[in-house]
Image (tube, coloured by chain):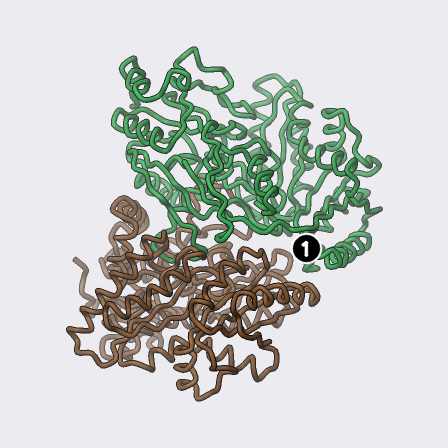
Chain colours: A green, B brown
């Protein structure tokens, strides 16, 4: 169905992309054949490090006319194969499009190219006393990648997700047309919301080449507290109580002892406390120290009433470093603890988090597999890992399938979603289809067709 | 193209809708032929006051099979003809679907039917110490209507718009299928965002029959301040300064003296001050009185530095009533001041508000027409009214067209949007098409086709 790239195609692409930014066939490093999880592998036929919207436009126009698949990629930190060229073709890498183009203080927006890294964006705006709230664990992901999966992160409890901070997108449609979806304006009731359709569409509808993001003033105060509990049940059952108390929290993270130990081993660094089964990490922020103190005192008392054994402020530089570096390393630490793993990134209503985590333990027993997890308890988004631990290939595949089937079935039962923030990509398509049913999948296929009638953009993904 | 409703169709509809909830032909009150602005008129052939999702499903299934147009309507408070049956057919009125179904305190959500009025929802949640932030001026609009136009209102500066508070929608597709888009979950990266596509789609893609809305804890404190200025320029030019100061404001409303006088005349009630040309109304809210005091002191000082002549607290019950009832009556007051009017609901980047209001005065002079306005200065959304003031029909039409052309052209130049919160409906289609261009309009048509291949849902609207 797709055209195999030949010398003529390469010659055309090289007519406007200089040698140093285009690689063909064996010149392409193996890194570009997979994402961070690495379960899905294929190299593109051509890799282009693009510099501008106009280059992307020219590439897509040609690819569309010649039926060549195109996949956009940022840092390649995704976990579901969304940035893998499963049909070959051209990979458009945006990592050189990494310029911050405008900080607009009177509209509280920043305009960036898609290759800007999350950590670069955060550092830049904080230097200017602004705040970009979305805070996924993977700080070396690009903003383009964050937009493509509607990344959420730890502060979603209070501040929402990437979608809530995208005001305008410059995109290139599959036929090469350049369009602007949305605007700097706060409000809009002007036709169907194309901008929100692109956020979370994993590069299947168009390629984002510029984004205008909403900023907030930087809160002057931020306080975190670590609360140990004697059991996992006690720890996660406190979360709905915290939410019901109407306290204003920025983050509520759940950590189990085994995951913390993995992170200690991985980092070679001690966590402040490893005497208990489970921990809840709470963050509060704002501009008024006294108000924050009132909030955390109220919440700490409530937690102790519900079984917290202690409460540590994560206040010294040393403690902050030890807690946040552990939290930031969970995924890599679990990955390092086994030969292969796959992930379930479900999100469930907040009052179902405890039940779901308990169920992961049941599934581990039923299937006979290790299933460590951690997650954003405050917004219902859990990161659950199924570990191979040296199992033979066939046994692993069978157990993985059985484990996933059970976990996703339970998420459906709880009216949850297949993915909270990592996306569907290639790996989770069957679970999305089961969750949404034929009607919704057909609506999505209709939308895909309206954008990409030749199906050249990131084929084989999402739908 | 559409089938004209005949006796057989009516008989079928009456087979499952009892007599008292269905009206045919001349039985239908004239109110259902137009919306609040009244420029576009046609009665539906059949009016049904629906009670359930299942009824809507049966009606749509039949209408789709028989090519009968269907328009959903709530309170009919819209201003662009979105809820007018311009092709006749069936009107589905949701005003009896007005039940609050669940207040979920552990997920901070409320589940409502679409016919619940905004004022009913606000009163209910505040009684339970929760807060539904979207606050459009028209409190007797239904939530279904608010969702269909992504209504914004006064608190958008701090809290965002209706879209930001819609977690899940139960919808009936044109073929009668019942689907759930979104979920109670805070995060999602699970395929294209169908829920956000429905918000703001003005009943052209499906009919919303239930909504799960996000709530916040009710802020304990709210303070408003009224600041008079000697000129319109002085008043609106202070707004970007307020925003740049990074103060946390809930609302920044702009009011001109002539609009205030119209409201005084209309209500027969005095406004606290009418000695100056223009006023800015500021609102602050939160849980800490002291922090709010710090904020408003800072902002009041900044306003006085930039030309505010005085600053009144809107604190006594009497003063609150006089200011907020005036603010709530602006639209009706302007409407009562003339024989006919039409509205331009543009939104521009916040730092363009002053320039745009100044331009409305220029246009008034160029075209020779009265153009009062008021608006949400803090989010860039202006409500601008072109008044007929007794002009002969032909002159009025010509001046209206010229005025609109000039205003929308300037909004495009400022990278604004055709509508901030009132929608496109029937009346603003040509301006949307000009704003977005053929590519985006074609994408929207492709989306419409994926949802409604027979074009039976609210035909002739938006696209």
Q: Position of residue B2 (x, y in %)?
A: 19, 60
Q: Residue at x 39, y 81 (%)?
A: B262
Out of B27 and A23, give the one closest to the viewer. Answer: A23
Q: Residue at x 58, y 28 (%)?
A: A342
Question: For residue B358, what is the image quadrant?
Answer: bottom left
Out of A58 and A110, give the one closest to the viewer. Answer: A110
Q: Which residue is mark 1?
A: A287
Question: For residue A48, what is the image quadrant?
Answer: top left
Outermost residue, bottom side: B268
- Quadrant where the C terminus of chain B sits is bottom left
Q: Position of residue A457 (x, y in %)?
A: 36, 31
Does residue A212 appear left or right of residue A323 in this picture? left
Outermost residue, top side: A26
Q: Residue at x 32, y 20 (%)?
A: A13
Does residue A264 appear left or right of residue A356 in this picture? right
Out of A237 and B288, give the one closest to the viewer. Answer: B288
Q: Tag 1, which chain? A: A
- Quadrant where the N terminus of chain B sits is bottom left
Answer whether residue B444 is visible to the viewer in this image.
Answer: yes
Out of B448 and B49, give the one closest to the viewer. Answer: B448
Q: Residues within 10 Å of mark 1 (few under 14, many from 20)?
A: some
Answer whether residue A410 is visible to the viewer in this image.
Answer: no
Does residue A302 appear left or right of residue B19 in this picture? right
User: Does residue A284 lie above or below A23 as drawn?
Assistant: below
Q: Position of residue B109 (x, y in %)?
A: 57, 59
User: Does residue B96 lie above or below A261 as drawn?
Assistant: below
């Amino acid at each position: 169905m797709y055209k195999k790239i030949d010398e003529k195609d390469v010659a055309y692409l090289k007519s406007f992309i200089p040698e140093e930014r285009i690689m063909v066939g064996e010149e392409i490093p193996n890194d570009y054949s997979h994402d961070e999880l690495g379960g899905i592998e294929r190299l593109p036929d051509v890799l282009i490090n693009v510099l501008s919207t106009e280059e992307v436009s020219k590439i897509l126009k040609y690819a569309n006319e010649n039926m060549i698949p195109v996949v956009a990629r940022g840092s390649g930190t995704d976990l579901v194969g969304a940035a893998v060229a499963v049909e070959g073709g051209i990979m458009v890498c945006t990592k050189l499009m990494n310029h911050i183009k405008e900080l607009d203080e009177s509209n509280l927006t920043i305009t960036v190219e898609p290759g800007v890294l999350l950590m670069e964006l955060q550092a830049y705006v904080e230097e200017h006393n602004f705040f970009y709230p979305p805070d996924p664990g993977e700080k070396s992901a690009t903003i383009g990648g964050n937009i493509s999966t509607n990344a959420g992160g730890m502060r979603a409890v209070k501040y929402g997700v990437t979608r809530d901070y995208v005001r305008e997108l410059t995109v290139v449609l599959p036929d090469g047309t350049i369009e602007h979806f949305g605007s700097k304006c706060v409000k809009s009731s002007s036709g169907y919301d194309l901008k929100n359709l692109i956020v979370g569409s994993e590069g299947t509808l168009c390629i984002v080449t510029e984004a205008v993001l909403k900023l907030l003033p930087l809160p002057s105060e931020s306080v975190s507290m670590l609360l140990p509990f004697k059991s996992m049940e006690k720890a996660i059952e406190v979360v709905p109580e915290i939410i019901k108390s109407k306290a204003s929290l920025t983050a509520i993270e759940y950590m189990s002892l085994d995951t913390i130990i993995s992170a200690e081993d991985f980092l070679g660094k001690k966590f402040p406390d490893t005497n208990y089964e489970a921990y809840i990490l709470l963050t509060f922020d704002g501009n008024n120290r006294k108000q924050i103190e009132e909030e955390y005192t109220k919440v700490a008392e409530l937690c102790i009433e519900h079984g917290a054994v202690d409460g540590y402020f994560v206040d010294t530089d040393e403690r902050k470093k030890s807690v946040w570096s552990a939290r930031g390393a969970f995924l890599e630490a679990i990955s390092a603890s086994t030969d292969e793993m796959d992930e379930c990134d479900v999100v469930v209503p907040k009052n179902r988090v405890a039940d779901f985590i308990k169920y992961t333990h049941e599934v581990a027993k039923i299937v006979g597999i290790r299933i460590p997890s951690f997650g954003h308890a405050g917004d219902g988004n859990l990161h659950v890992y199924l570990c191979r631990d040296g199992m033979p290939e066939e046994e692993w595949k069978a157990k993985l399938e059985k484990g996933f089937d059970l976990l996703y079935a339970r998420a459906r039962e709880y009216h949850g979603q297949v993915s909270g923030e990592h996306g569907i990509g290639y790996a989770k398509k069957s679970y999305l289809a089961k969750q949404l049913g034929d009607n919704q999948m057909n609506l999505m296929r209709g939308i895909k067709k309206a954008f990409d009638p030749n199906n050249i953009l990131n084929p084989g993904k999402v739908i």
